[in-house]
Structure formats: C-alpha cells, structure tokens
Image (cartoon, helix red, strand yellow):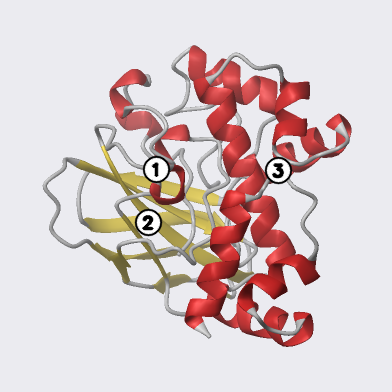
Amino acid sequence: MHDAVERAVATMWERFDEPLTLTDIADTAILSKFYFSRVFRTLTGTSPSRFLAAVRLCMAKKLLLETTVSVTDISIMVGYNSLGTFTSRFTRSVGVPPARFRLMCQLGMSATPSALRPGNPAAHRGSVHGEVYVPESPHPIRIYVAAFKESIPEGQPKSCDILEGPGSYRLIGLPDGQWSVRVAVVPKRAVAAGPMVRQPLFIGAAQKPVVISGGKAVEADIMTRPPGNLDIPILLALPELDGWQPLEAALPIRSSEVTASVVPGA
C-alpha cells in the first residue's frame, strides 16, 4: 500500500496544475477511490484532496519566490480557476496573502514576519516544554518548534520557539485543549534540491496530541527524522522552511524575537 500511495503523491506533484479528481488519483494507485482514501489518510495523516491542495500552494510559494509572474497567472498555473479562491486558500494556509508573502521575502522579512506573534503567557494558560533531538548533520541548523490546533500544520501557530541547535524548547500561552506540537530543522544555508524534496533537513512531532488542562505545563520530548515523500509540504509564511532561499537573506533574529516563528509537520 505504501508504494501505491507514493505513486499517487508523485502524480500530484507531476500534475498539480490539472483538474485532478479523486478517481484520477486513485487510478494511479490502482485502488478503488474509497479504499484509496482510507489508506492515504492512514499513511499521510490527511485526505488526498487536502494533500493535493498543499502541493498546489507549495508550488505557488515557489513561483512567488522565484519568478515575477503575477498572482493571477500563478493561481491558474497551480490549478485554480478563481483568483479569489486561490487567494483565500493561500492566506488561510500560509498565514499571509500571496502578494504580501512575495513582498515580505523581497524585503528580507521572512525570518520575523509581523503576522507572527509569540504565545501570550497569560494567566490560566498552559505551556509545553521538552527536548528536541536531531540526527547529526553537516549543515549549520536552526530549529523551529510550534503548536497548532489542527493535526495538519498550516497558517499561524498558537505558540512558537526557535532554537539554534538541539536542546530545550518552551511553548507558552496555550489555552486549555488539545494541541499538535511540530518541529522543523532547517539548514542555515540553502541546500539545492528538487521541489519534492525541498523540505527541512529533519521534521518531527510529539508522539501524541498534547492536552493542556487548567493552565498546567506539559512535557513532550520530540525526535526528528528526515522527511519522506508522504510528508505533506509546508504551508507557512517562512520560505526558508521550504529551502526556497538562504536564511542569510533574511533579517537577523534578535534575542527578543526568538519565540516568534512557525513550523511544519511530520
């Protein structure tokens, strides 16, 4: 089943600009669409339609960063017939509208976009803390940790932290409820790769959703691993998380800003 789903994901990356239906994608996996949907969700954590939407928006980020093509034309190039639909989905998933995303990157604002805020350490709100473990890497790294309400990390996280190497993290200001804690480890310098693998060096997530109750602190250590083909692409406002530009091109992060960032999923 793993190979079948990998074929389907490869089809999404190759034909993201086409009006693919669930039947079209399931046919590439040689499975019925109903069985395929169940298997796909089990292996990727999301539905085929949502994965395809993420691929399209990921490619839109690439085009916004690497070309001067208009937002209208990009929306068509990544499979959207409506500019309004494309803009609303991009904004909801990435955290900022496409034109602002492009401008932020051109101005070197990618490391500390104003749309992102650290968690609010208000009374009766909880926190998550723990250790992030990272495999050895020949590249200097930066680690992004964040808490999301949904299991799929997109849009703005509720709380975030940045580490300059493996070690302790802390996410503050989390209301009572269930949270998905995600980690991305990125190189501080761009590493050339094709679009399907322009992902962080390593990704990770808390083994199960973190439950905050009564404003208490919860401990959750996180192991990271290399990303695979079945990992959903990143949909956040930091282009360096996709490897689209070197971190050196962004504004330097000040110590006072070290908790204002975002992270993708595993």
| Left or right of 262 in this view: 142 | left
Visible residue check, residue 211: no
Residue annotated with mark 1: 194
Q: Earlier in the sequence, mark 3 or mark 1?
A: 3
| Left or right of 66 in this view: 184 | left
Q: The residue under label 1 is which amino acid type?
A: Gly
Can you give x and y, in whole percent of width and height, for residue 24 in the image? 75, 66
Q: Is residue 109 above or below residue 11?
A: above
- In this view, the residue in front, 188 or 253, is 188
Given contact means CB atoms under 8 Å apart, are the residues at marks 1 and 2 in contact? no
Residue annotated with mark 2: 170
Visible residue check, residue 29: yes
| Left or right of 95 in this view: 164 | left
Residue at the image point whose x is 58% and y is 46% from the top: 235
Element assignment for label 1: loop
Element assignment for label 3: loop
| Mark 1 crowd level (few <14, some 14–19, many ≥20, 10 Å Cα) | few
Residue 34's label in the rendered image is none
Residue annotated with mark 3: 17
Q: The residue under label 2 is which amino acid type?
A: Arg
Q: CA distance from mark 3 to mark 2?
A: 40 Å
Residue at the image point whose x is 26% and y is 58% from the top: 168
Can you give x and y, in whole percent of width and height, for residue 226 in the image? 30, 62
- In this view, the residue in front, 204 or 174, is 204
Q: Is residue 232 above or below residue 199?
A: below
